[in-house]
Image (cartoon, coloured by chain):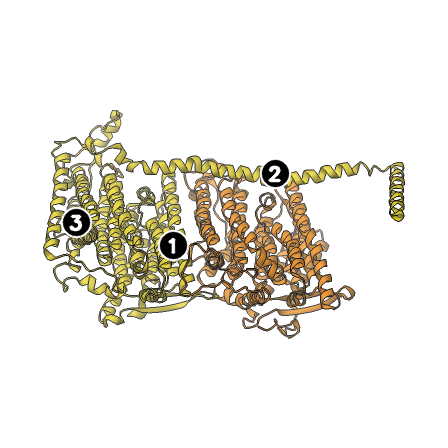
Chain colours: A yellow, B orange
Amino acid sequence: MLDLIWLVPGLPLAGFLVLTVAGRRIGEPGAGWLATGALTGSFLVTVGVHLDLAGRAVDDRRSVTTLFEWVPAGDLSVDVGFLVDPLALTMCLFITGVGALIHMYAIGYMHGDVDFGRFFAYMNLFAFAMLMLVLGDSLLLTFLGWEGVGACSYLLISFWFTDEANASAGKKAFITNRIGDWGFMVAMFATFFAFGSLDYVDVLDAAAAGTVAQTTATLIAVMLFVGAVGKSAQFPLHLWLPDAMAGPTPVSALIHAATMVTSGVYLLTRVNPLIADAAGWVPDMIAWVGVGTALFAATAALAQTDIKKVLAYSTISQLGYMFLAVGTGAYVAAVFHMITHAFFKALLFLGAGSVIHGMDGDQDLRHYGGLRRFMPVTATTFIIGWLAIAGVPPFAGFWSKDEILAFAWDRSPALWLVGLVTAVLTAFYMTRQVALTFFGRYRYPEPRTGGEDPATVAARADHRPHESPLTMTLPLVVLAVLAIGGGLMQLPFSSSTKRLEAWLEPSLFGNEVHLGLGAGTQWVLAAVAVVGGAVGIALALVVYLQRRISDRAIERPLLADAWRFDRYVSGFMGGPGRRGFEATTRFDERVVDGAVWGVAGIVSRTAGVLRLFHNGMVRTYAAGIGVGAVALLIWFLTRSTL
Amino acid sequence: MTVPVTLAAAGAVSFPVLPALILVPLLGALLVIVMPRRRPELLKLVAVSVSVVTGAMSVWLFTAFDTGVTGFQFGTEQVWIRDLGISWLLGIDGISLFLVVLTGLLFPISLLAVDPDHHSRSYYAWMLVLEAAVMGVFCSLDLLVFFLCFEAVLVPMYFLIGRWGHGDSARAATKFFLYTMAGSALMLVGILALAFMHADAAGEALTFDLVAIAEAQSLSTGAARWIFLAFALAFAVKVPIFPLHTWLPDAHTEAPTAGSVILAGVLLKLGTYGFLRFGLYLFPEASHFFAPVFLTLGVVGIVYGAVVATMQRDLKRLVAYSSVAHLGFIILGTFSLNTEGLEGSLLQMVNHGVSTGALFLLVGMIYERRHTRQIDELGGLQKSAPVMAAVFTLVMLSSIGLPGLNGFVGEFLILLGAFNAHRWWAVVAASGVILAALYLLWAYQRVFHGPAHGDNAEMPDLRIREGLVLAPLLALIVFMGVYPKPVIERMEPAVDALVEHIERNVDGFIEPVSRMGADIDPDDGDHDSHGEG
């Protein structure tokens, strides 16, 4: 089965090529089913390879399959090859599995779009790039996927390109990501310099053997972290993700929640021996950036009125948890949370898409209310997703978040405390979203603030929200089941229930930190987290269902604006940044090119002066010859006398 | 390391293909001139056929090229002026091969893509003369013949820009001609001084044979440095290197589409090729000595070109400034003086020719339809021309350096090589990848995204003929990104030989390569051991 690993990225690539050539002709819904089929095929192959690998001895669970030489130049030799190990396969499983569900969902969601074929071509191309990212056997091949998913993200965010805002959001995502990619590139240069190779097997084995100096490992780890911060939307490069919600909702679910944004976490997990060799402040920095981003984004999520923006900030916040886990050496917990998050956040995004679909494109939470009566499947599954992310046992999110918080406590109670506050806030804003969307009164037909035209209000009176078609609700149900039971892969009770940890062990080179806490402490920590979640939920219910406290106290403009950070950055870019660019351009026109014209002018003026002597009059020339002859004569005479 | 194989020993080819590369277009030009006046439609047919034949020969060279041979292949020698030691000494190696192939491909494409709106006869004749001259530059191994061809390029280009260009084309053509002419004037002095000093020092008859002079290295260090500067000035203007670049945007913008494609695709490579073939090979010590200057100018060019490109209002001018940035990368790789950097530079020369050539063709197609290149006046074109938008996207991503497409491999190797040689330059230069995304994506957004108004909403999509013209370039963009090996393996022997030549002739210089297990000391930015140190 292992030999077939090339099919895993190969099938979506083939799907992309077919759809590029014939997407328009295949049309709807065939193009969608073709793309879904391609990814389902990859999922099945992944399962087969997974079983094959699981049947082998633990130290035989890493293999490299080389397809062909890619860049053989000088000392550098990079192949197109796949590193199949437990970490890569785990990533592939949820990318192809969740990906196939989202593709299927999109068949219903994108119904009637003029560019139906183009959409699925991009989706399959994205899946291909994402799979190359996790399967690549070298940093350079991972970078190929890394940039590839960035390009697909750009194409899909600006998919509805006639709207300026969508186009700008796509561009912003790409350029912000490129800042991170700069870090990734520098990390590769340094890796090649120090190891003479970019292949994971060479680099990681050498690093695990401790042959690399600390400063080198530090530089590489920090630069890869810069790349990860960009791709995984951590502070301060998180700016692009809220804007990226401009893309179609299946895109938000697949790329901006379940898969692409977790690439940074994957990358840092992959290079764990380098982080282990780096200076001690590197993991601390990763942990603090992670937990800080988690808290920051959670506060911003409190005050968003767009259903997708709440989820966008929530994603940034949850990714922060994963960075916290990486920073505390809890790689298994990071991957665990990545998977459960893929389940419940994809579920929430698809649920939000279903709501938007049923509400004719309206994304404002304030206009919803009471929707559970109209869309029971969406409501039920969304509620499951809510319980999972809010950390209610025994849903999947509880187990993974609990494990991260335990490791945070083990490293530093301060990290734990920030993580706990974030968990309370998470429970609060998610409850707010559920309450505003599915509970309370149905507010859609009501007049809105801002003095609406009565005709507009009347036009809304006939609107009936509707449940989505089966292609959309079926993925919701499957993901809901996963969001309930996903925790089973890693239960903290004994070493035999920590299945994910045992499975991932060959990829971690013994760098997984082992928790020094007693069972008692762990129970207490878990209890505190559950109580915290319950408090968050209860408070939100008081505010948004019982309306005993005004929501104005919570939904501050400063929070809605995400602490105005984006405003400052765009202000700088549009102000001093732009002026600097303009000044450089003027410098080019006036000084650099001006100098050229200046030289030309001098030549031309000198020539003008010289031209006076070439006036075509014999007398002038004769006079010149005469003067010259006399001068020469004098010169010779004076010299000869000396 | 042995001396590169001499011409007599290399490639026993019976058909003199390199002279044919020069003569066929030249004879084609003559044919175009004497064609009967009654059949004007035949002019294009003849011109295209001639360039296709030339292109086919260049592709044949690629397949017949022996990757196992160091030194020059397909060599021919025809004595020209015996007393002065000047001869038609032609030969190619892994460094010139790809520029010959690129020239062979881009000429038929640009001839097919655009028809001149007046004076077709002289247009086609000048294009073919230009092709012959360019082929002469890339094949000649005699310094004076090289110089002759190098200068001969200017004349057809001057007329192509001046007579078939847009806007203030006469002014741009004159600026182009005088600027580059002034640059190369010193090179002629340099060539003469070099040949005479070499003949003196070696006690031999006067010769302009590149290999003989370069392998002898008979000049004193001081003299070599001065003569290097004379060559470098000519090449620096031609590349162009910041701050000698301002002829480029004018010439590019005012040139006809085919002129821009050839200018970007081939003519800018005359300078970078000159640095590799004549700068590094003839003057290894001086190249090493002045490397920091050129590295710095290269990095400045990358950042500066991108910044100025961002603010351009004319789409063609924007592409022209992007060339300044791309060529900065090539200079950076060249003066890294290691295999990765040099191979990256060579790849980037080809890639830039393909990608920027395609960009100019696309801009030309937009201009032909909309009669404007002002970015403000365009917008929403993806709605009316989705296929053109898709092609533009692919070319744009290639130009940005997306892995999997051609632009990335060259750029990455250049930066990798530069990092091994001069770390901080590479770190700054890598920021060029952010800026490239900025100016191209922003331009794309303003031209193709957003709502379409007026004529933009009605713009016709790509025609079949235009698609066919672009197809070979698009195929190369993907192929060179996915499987650059056939290209790199043909370069490697020549590049390795060049690096060894530099190592041999510069005291204490060791190729800056990766140091396994080495520590990166943050205070030490320069691992290149200088001979003087």
Do the residues indicated by labels 1 and 2 lie within the same chain of the protein? yes
Q: How packed is label 3: few (under 14 Cα within 10 Å), some, or many (20 or more)?
A: many
Q: How packed is label 2: few (under 14 Cα within 10 Å), some, or many (20 or more)?
A: some
**Foreground tag (2 vs 3):** 2
State whether residue B525 is above or below residue A309: below
Which of the two labelled residues, at mark 3 and mark 1, occupies the earlier sequence position? 1
State whether residue A607 is above or below residue B9: above
Quarter placement of the N terminus of chain A: bottom left
Q: Which mark is residue A184?
A: 1
Picture quadrant where residue A279 is located: bottom left
Q: CA gap, disc 1 to disc 2?
A: 39 Å
Please state the chain letter of the residue tagged with numbered disc 1 in the rendered image. A
Specify the amino acid type for callout 1: Phe
Specify the amino acid type for callout 3: Ala
Q: Relative to B32, is B454 on the left or the right?
A: left
The residue wearing badge 3 is: A388
Which of the two labelled residues, at mark 1 and mark 2, occupies the earlier sequence position? 1
The residue wearing badge 2 is: A594
x, y percentage for residue A102? 26, 52
Do the residues indicated by labels 2 and 3 lie within the same chain of the protein? yes
Specify the amino acid type for callout 2: Gly
x, y percentage for residue A546? 11, 34
Q: CA gap, disc 2 to disc 3?
A: 66 Å
Q: Relative to A492, is A208 on the left or the right?
A: right
x, y percentage for residue B396? 46, 50
Please state the chain letter of the residue tagged with numbered disc 3 in the rendered image. A
